[in-house]
Amino acid sequence: MNAKGQRENFIDIMAGFTVYTGKYLPDDVHAKLKELREKEDSALATIVYDAMFEDLRLAHELERPLCQDTGVIQYFIQVGTGFPLIDQMEECLVEAVKKATVLGPLRHNAVEVFDEKNTGNNVGKRIPWIDWEIVPDNDEATVYVYMAGGGCSLPGIAKVLMPLEGYEGVVKLVFDQITSYGINACPPLLVGIGIAGSVEVAAKLSKKALLRPIGSKNSNPRGAELEARIEEGLNALKIGPGGLTGENSVMGVHIEEAARHPATIAVGLSTGCWAHRRAVIKFNADMDYEIISHKGVVL
Amino acid sequence: MKTKILTTPIQDEELELLTVGDIIYLTGYLITSRDDVHQRLIKQHKQLPVDLAGKAIFHAGPIMQEIEGQPGKYRVISIGPTTSMRMEKYEKEFIRQTGLKLIVGKGGMGQNTAAGCREYKAVHAVFPGGCAVLAANCVEEVEQVEWLDLGMPEAMWVMRVKEFGPLIVSIDTKGNNLFENNKKAFNLKKDAVVEEICRYVDYLE
Ligand code: SF4
């Protein structure tokens, strides 16, 4: 394939994959929702889970976005320095979003700050948001698509604590946010926590924590233990699907960390809703792709 | 818990029989009204282009698609509720001025809305969040769109719906507020849970 053909091909696949992300939940989220649904027997929790699964069925049957809020489109990319399209990644992804918006159709969710105008095509200043990780000596690219809905972005917060507030401060902040804002963010939630030395690092890591597959653990044994304790603790509140009470509250709790300054503990919190639309695709240098998040799917 | 179908125009007497936690379905007129519509009526004193008396509003920003060959005619692709709490500031006054009877949204609303529901006889109910295709499937026809200059999510979409639901009553006409009650229950448990976890996080050397 010539360079131009490769570029067009990549744009088309990413446009299609972005649309796909809005219609089908990834395998891990789907499995977790099923598991949580089976634990419910109250009338309200059952009716909400039934509605979710009926919605997923209809979205599949009618090929439509499963939630109307298809979010602000964010791409988290891991690109090898030898990936043929590395120089054009950004413009390609912008093109892909424009195409996906029409194809989807996706809701128009990019409002320019200060001008307060909706751009009408999901492209705006620095949007789609692209987060880069460069991989040396490699010619592949892995792209995470994330649809950042309004409702599930609302509980987000980041704050720098003094070290003497300790990890207790982190735990408290998470619980305060989830019991206030989290209830309206379409639970069961996926909770992402970032711990670092400054606020932007903590915030970014909290979002990256949401990209991890459900069921995965923090690489530090203490981190993994804290994840499990917070998960258990949030579930003990019995927030239930839609905040209408039930046996559980969350699909999981993920923590990602960076070494901190001795004088600060920064904490970031991001939440994903039950409609956690996070999808992963991997390209090789020939633009052959494999969809990691939805096994066996070909666009 | 009761299950009931409400048909517009909704009568006060029917609403008075409802209690938080009841499941209802709506047949008749459901009109999207969210942030900007509330703002235009209450803050900017603009006249609403749609009569809402006896009808239901939906806190929602849909994906609509113009039907090919029929300019100005739309079909709904995906429509789910948005966070109702954002409308809390204006909702009581909005109920008073419009005479609406049912507010459909997501998550709870506050004291102001509960007072409005009690004084002017209205109910707030939630549709399961994110279930947007399920909701779209209950829409028979998008009859009209007004204030499209606000953009697709904020415009007023006038829809005729059939057995739209499930809707869970979250604020009734008696001043009960399901989410406020739930929140209290969650908060009551919270401190003990946090304290228990904190016993294990003394990592600082
Ligand atoms: S919180 Fe998630 S499921 Fe709920 S409306 Fe927003 S994007 Fe959809």
Image (cartoon, coloured by chain):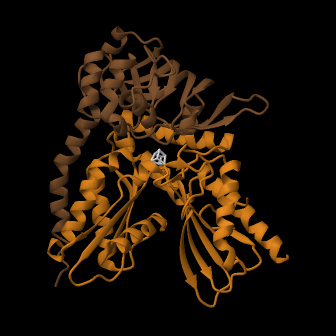
Residue in the image at 68% along x and 84% along y? A139
Q: Nearer the viewer, residue A212 or A174?
A: A174
Measuring from the top left, give residue B119's x and y in whole percent.
25, 17
Find residue A213 and report its horizontal and vertical position in percent.
Answer: 49, 66
- Residue B35 higher or lower than A115, as above or below: above
Q: Nearer the viewer, residue A98 or B128?
A: A98
- The residue nearer to you, when weighing A106 against B176, is A106
What residue do we see at 68% from left, 61% from top? Answer: A96
Figure chain in brown: B
Q: Where is residue B58 in the image (x, y as percent from the top left)?
A: 46, 29
The answer to whether one can see residue B1 in this image is no
What residue is drawn where x is 54% and y is 52%?
A: A110
Name the residue furthest bottom. A137
Image-based side of B100 in relation to A291, left or right: left
The residue sitting at 19% across, 71% down in the picture is B200
**Eyeballing the image, is A85 above or below A119?**
below
Residue B22 in which image quadrant? top left
Residue at the outermost right position: A1
In the displayed structure image, the side of residue A5 where residue B187 appears, left or right: left
Q: Is residue B61 above or below residue A159?
A: above
Count of numbered marks: 0
Q: Going by the image, does B49 lie left or right of A188?
A: right
Judging by colour alone, the chain drawn in orange in this rendered image is: A
- The N terminus of chain A - image quarter: bottom right
Quarter of the picture holding the C terminus of chain A:
bottom right
- Identify the image quadrant of residue A91: bottom right
